[in-house]
Image (tube, rainbow, N blue to C red):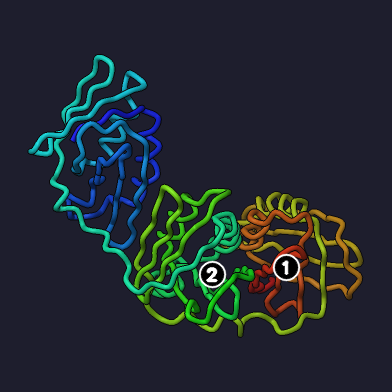
Amino acid sequence: MKFSITKETILDGLQQVQSVISTRTTLPILQNVLIEARQGALVLSTTDLDVGISASIDAEVEEHGATTLPARRFFSICRELPASDASIEVDSRNVATLRSGNALFKILGLAREEFPPMAPLEKARTLKLPQQLLKDMLRRTSYAISHDETRYVLNGILMSFKERKLTMVATDGRRLALADTEVELAPSQEADIILPTKAVNELQRLLKDEGEATLNMTDSRCSFDLGRARLMSKLTEGNYPNYRQVIPAETKERVSLERETFLTTIRRVALLTSEKSSSVKLAFSKDTATLSANSPDVGEARESIAVKYRGKDFAAAFNPEYLMDPLRNLADDEVHFDFVDDTSPGVIRVSSSSFLYVIMPMRMA
């Protein structure tokens, strides 16, 4: 195998694929990147056996072939190359000779036959979706994924394709984020899949602001084809909880707030919270919200902001990080905070999209 490539191109390709690699694996081949030289391109692939990524990059290929090289070491070498171009030749023993400027490196690889194959998905349901749509929906929901490994079905995002809608849901039991949108969907394409956290993170990194994504789904695996990149992942087995039962059927009070003002005020007031007292109190009166935090071992903070509200006076307390998460990931200027009472879940909504965020209140001192 022999090819020439620019430093910038090889670094871009390696950055797309190397984050999948686990540092805790006991299989040496899983530390390597598979490099396949084809007509005018290199295909770089990595996997941890659960999630795999492939990326195609431009190269001048003189001899076709394939090998695997230690991904992180190879990336470090490419990053330090003295010239903007590099030539790489791999012999029959999988030793790669890399030349750039006056520098020469010999890197010991492993045979491509040892690399776990990414088998194609058979009898998969296929859907085409705008990458921008997926990117936006994941941004608005993924922060609510549970990190409690004992509740493994919550360690990912539910993607539900039902009734001509794509619904994404993430919850950790204390808050729930939901986004949905209408999609063209045949009855044969209906499915519920749980995409694991690692695949969610990698997909968010790979998605672009333009172009189309082709999603292929079976009962146990899925793939996202994103132009010159591809992500494959095992799916989480199990049934996602009935998330609709935690969404209040109706609410009594609505407070409309300027999103950025609300976010920055929470951030300031939360500076006076502590591990023992990690809640921010929201007190609502006519057209005013007063945010406060009080920690006996730290101090207290209080700030008022103008809101649109004409209901009765009431107050509720929330975890400030949980309050800030949706506000950071929405683009709308205004958000609506709906309540039943001070002990029931609050619901954040926006006017421009099918999004809601359910957050459990904390006990007030």
| Residue position marked by numbered label 1 in the rendering | 349
Task: Name the residue at 21% across, 41% down.
Answer: 69
* Circles 2 and 1 in contact, beta carbons < 8 Å: no
Which of these two is toward me, 228 or 243?
A: 228
Residue 265 visible: yes
| Viewer-closest of 69 and 256 | 69
Q: Pick the quarter of the image with the N terminus.
A: top left
Q: Which residue is mark 2?
A: 170
Snapshot quadrant of residue 311: bottom right
Closer to the camera in the image, 266 or 113: 113
* Image location of residue 115, percent across then percent down: 19, 53
Q: Residues within 10 Å of mark 2 (few under 14, many from 20)?
A: many
**Residue at (14% x, 44% y) in the render:** 110
Determine the secondary structure under disc 2: strand
Residue occupying the far top of the picture: 102
Quadrant of the drawing holding the C terminus:
bottom right
- The image shows residue 222 at horizontal and vertical percentages of 39, 67
The kind of residue tagged 1 is Arg
Give me the C-alpha separation between circle 2 and circle 1.
16 Å
Please tell me in which quadrant of the rendered image residue 70 appears.
top left
Relative placement, left or right, of 302 versus 306 is: left
The picture places residue 183, in percent across and down from the top left corner, at: 60, 70
Of callouts 2 and 1, which one flags the residue occurring earlier in the amino acid sequence? 2
Amino acid type for the residue under numbered disc 2: Ala
Is 84 located above or below residue 198 in the figure? above
Q: Dot 1, how many residues are within 10 Å of its Cα: few (below 14), some (14-19), or many (20+)?
A: some
Q: Is residue 275 visible?
A: no
Disc 1, SS: strand
* Residue at 25% from the left image edge and 44% from the top image edge: 36
